[in-house]
Image (cartoon, grey):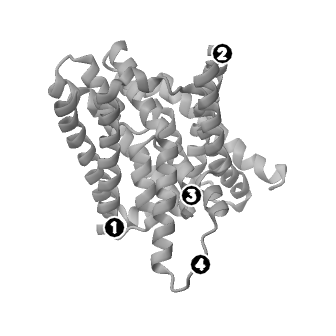
Amino acid sequence: MKPVRAVLPGFGLSLVIAIISQWINADLLKGIGAPTVALLIGILLGNTVVRQPFWYSGTAWSEKRLLEYSVMLLGATITFQTIQQLKLTGIIFIVLQMTITISGAIWLGSRLHFSEGMTLLMAGGNAVCGSSAIAAITPAIDAKDEDKRLAVTLVNLMGTILMLTLPIISLLAFHHDNFLRGAMIGGTVQSVGQVIASATMINQPTTTFATLFKIMRIILLIAVVLIFSQIHQHHQAATTTTTVKPNISANLKRALPWYVVGFVVLCTLNSWVHFDPIISNSAHFLSGWCEVTALAAIGLRLNFAAFVKAGKKLAFYGGGVLLLQVVSVWILITVLL
């Protein structure tokens, strides 16, 4: 465990950026999303004036731990009863949309010669819930920190593009049908905050439907983590020349880190006893702040030169997955809903 004195400077800086980002999102650039603003400010500062080792321990702690807390607290904001409201066709729609997104991201990532870690993080981040999904998947597949930062940055930028464009695209595709427009936004946009911000640009009924579809994706987070862990294990077995006896306990611990277990426990408890709105709202508030602060830290630690070096390839990857998501959600909604 790192000393508190070593952690405080980097954590404090990340928190200050988070506060500024919340203010910018609320008063200056409404709708773009505080996480995206925090990430961009962090990248700007981290690659110019904040490059001293003095900050490293705190930003490293904030990047890792705060995303973990954000994932866990998210469980207290959702319930399994959501599934009943979407009915069978809604569930099938979400499962198919997530499957197409994951398969497409893995296929395109491998064709562009990205690492296994990067492709799986991109697949999970886009299919489930952005940064929170990436944080949950990272330890299950032994992904590198650099892959995590690149995936978080790209997924958040993609989410911002979808957040701003889907209200218009959904109007062209489904006119003023609030349920179908909510399905498009809730089944596609990356983070919870981006889903709500995008749907709010339309109206309250669309926001309600979009949130329901988004919650269904979040509920499936645990399944995605377990499946990706198995994919990683099979890939390791295929690339190693020695036979390693499978360690079920170690594999389960890797696939289910403490915060994913906490997510499941809180979600189950909320489904069973229904937390008081004060508890759920507090968990939502804290989860949001943890995510924004963590993204500020990730921005501070991101090597922008490396990001730019892979710019064309990353742009093609992100654009390809984004296009796949929009086209597939359009077709699935037309066929199923």
Q: Disc 4 vs disc 1: which is toward the camera?
A: 4
**Residue ID at (34%, 63%):** 109
Q: Earlier in the sequence, mark 3 or mark 1?
A: 1
Q: Looking at this view, is 315 or 304 the one in front?
A: 315
Image marks 3 and 1: residues in contact by CB distance under 8 Å = no
Secondary structure beneath dot 4 equals loop
Q: CA distance from mark 2 to mark 4?
A: 49 Å
Q: Which disc number belongs to residue 244?
A: 4
Q: How many other residues sit within 10 Å of disc 2, few (<14), some (14-19) or many (≥20)?
A: few
Secondary structure beneath dot 1 equals helix
Looking at the picture, does residue 321 appear above or below residue 176?
Answer: below
Is residue 76 toward the left or the right of residue 238 in the image?
right
- Return the residue at label 1: 110
Q: Where residue 229 sits in the image (x, y, percent)? A: 52, 59
Q: CA distance from mark 3 to mark 4?
A: 18 Å
- Return the residue at label 3: 140
Looking at the picture, does residue 159 appear above or below residue 337?
Answer: below
- Name the image quarter holding the C terminus: top left
Secondary structure beneath dot 3 equals helix
Looking at the picture, does residue 304 appear above or below residue 95?
Answer: below
Q: Earlier in the sequence, mark 2 or mark 4?
A: 4
Q: Earlier in the sequence, mark 3 or mark 4?
A: 3
Q: CA distance from mark 3 to mark 1?
A: 19 Å
Q: Disc 3 vs disc 1: which is toward the camera?
A: 3
Amino acid carrying label 4: it is: Val
Whether residue 305 is visible: no
Amino acid carrying label 1: it is: Ser
Q: Earlier in the sequence, mark 3 or mark 2?
A: 3
Please identify the quarter of the rendering in which residue 91 is found. top left
- Return the residue at label 2: 278
Q: CA distance from mark 4 to mark 1?
A: 25 Å
